[in-house]
Image (tube, grey):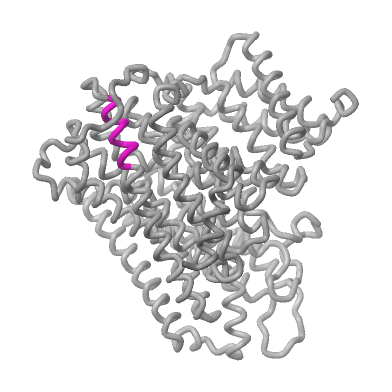
Amino acid sequence: MNNMRTRNLIAGIILLSLCAVYAYLTANLPTRNIENTTQPSFFPWVITFCLTGLSLSLLIQGILPVFNSKESAVIDVPVKRLLSGLALSLIYLIALPILGFIASNIPFFAGLMYLYGERRPVWIFGGSALTSLVVFELFREVFQIRLPAGILEGLI
Amino acid sequence: MSPDVIDGFLQATQLSTIIAVASGCLIGLIIGMIPGLTISTGIIIVLPLTFVLEADISIALLLGLYVSGMTGGSFSAILLNIPGTPSASATAMDGHPMALNGEGGRALGIAITASFVGGFFSFLCLYFIAPLLAEIALKFQSPDLFSLVFFGLTIICSFAAKSLVKGLLSAVIGLAIVTIGQDPMMGTARFTFGELNLIAGIHFLTALIGLFAIPQLVDNFADIVKGGVKEKSAARISRVFPKLSDLKLMRLPMAIGASIGSFLGILPGAGGPIAAFISYDYAKKLSKSPDEYGKGSPQGIAAPESANNAVTGGALIPMMTLGIPGDPVTAILIGALLIHGLAPGPLLFVENGEFAYGLIFSFFWANIFNLIIAFIGLRFLVKVLVVPKALLMPTIAILCVIGSYALRNNFFDVYMMFGFGLLGLAMRWLDMPVVPLLLAMVLGRQLEEHLRISLIASKNDVSVFFTSPFSLFFLCLAAASIFWSFWAEHKSKQKKRAPSG
């Protein structure tokens, strides 16, 4: 079984499971007693049927050798680098509401610079601090978008 | 001449609007030429600005970026053989050989001139066709509008996907996401799980930022690993302005490109890359010297460049008159209009005629400034090709976060953006296009509303969709579009199997 067929199979199973959950939630939507009208669940049911049919087609494409598609879209990135990027983003998203934009942006920016291949410490620290500050001030003061300063609220 | 036309022209000629168009053009040229950044990413970068600017100024800025992004893509295609945007792929075939022969400046001049001609022709199409189409569209009833939106979705899926099943799946997932939030007819909360932030639904701009920017940031990891973009021939630019002999040579390919680009732009989903390749093919077939194509022929640059810029005006026609976006950029334009309380569609010309014509004339200025800024700033602009990605990519990441936060001043949207980014990566892994999902998110609410209104009005009689001539026409087109896609997919698979069998 080639690469794309395996992926189609996995995606087909996941999508069918999601269809089941979506159908369950749709079945539990409230109904309205108004004559000659469609219920709030009407459109979600239409989607459920379409999604089920298409997911089954994808599953069949994954199972049957007739659909022997050789193309395989690859996210051509080293897994370690990708996972480091995702972990960094997760930590950043958790820290963002607590620390505010500047305090969380600087280490996030520095981490990303490192992941994008920058190794000079002065560039990393200078670049991350300066860019974060400029972007923050630009949006907060010039464009009047109230970005939360978090723990640095009194200082900025 | 209608007073709306004059008012629209005056609105588009105000200093603030002109500055916005020119700034958009400058940003568009820069973003377009950087390989790995698409026009959608450029729009994402300037998106937070559109929340604080007036509607006409926001749209002028975005239009400038849209038009110039197409032209900017050709710069890196010609100088580095790396198309800055997918629409510039065909340009590289003749542009780069010219650059290697020391004619980089000439090739860039041809690309800029052809872009202007294509863009200007599509402006004329937009100016003359859009009001007429809007007038016809005013006669549409709910069943017609449902069938029209349905047709728009099917054509987007068929154009945007290698596999129709995956294209349709992407669109249906988008429709499922749209059902989160209040039901458009009765206001019942659906799939909100008690989360207040979901009552108003998921903002499609949040989805757009996540779906486009995060996979692109990940893609650029790969570029770094492979050694990044080298700036080998960026510095050497000779004479830029095309000679009279070049202009004579470019006439036919530019005309082909402008006509094909404007026509394909009107079709939702066709987009710049398809228009560029079809125009290149036609120009080659009709050329007196087809053998020169692919070896550095000016005509091979003129046809695709004229076509991809002509797509921009063409794509604005269904967006403005029917409210149907042809590509992610016009989807964002719809989003920007909605944020300012303006709904694109046939009523735009009736209720906000001045604004509608202002938009059309801003598009005109965008083409003018694209020409001026590209010619004057070319030598400085190409220096951007050497900006380190280690600085550029984290800046884009932070702008994405700010863009999604600024939508509703809410961290929830930032988390949603990240979630959509992961979804975008999963879809990339599966070779599933994201464009149908995004456009389904734009059109989904309209689709549900028109479907339910039609059924309520007809007392649940589905024949209403087949008795109206407009509706029947669009449904036939939708069926033909699906059938054609299946047939094309089948043929393509047969072709692939033939050499091995």
Residue B91, given in percent of the width and then of the height, sits at 29, 37
| Outermost right residue | A154
Residue B108 within the segment the image draws in magenta: yes
**Of the pair A25 and B396, the residue shown nearer to us:** B396
Would residue B440 appear left or right of B130 to someone viewing this image? Answer: right
Residue name at image x 35 percent, y 56 percent: B262
Above or below B470: residue B425: above
Residue B264, given in percent of the width and then of the height, sits at 34, 57
**Of the pair A76 and A13, the residue shown nearer to us:** A76
Residue A35 within the segment the image draws in magenta: no
Residue name at image x 59 percent, y 69 percent: B446
Residue name at image x 22 percent, y 32 percent: B243
Above or below B469: residue A101: above
Q: Is residue B5 in view from this perspective?
A: yes
Residue A152, given in percent of the width and then of the height, sits at 85, 25
Above or below B400: residue A78: above
- Secondary structure mostly seen in magenta is helix
Please give the range of residues in magenta.
Answer: B104-114
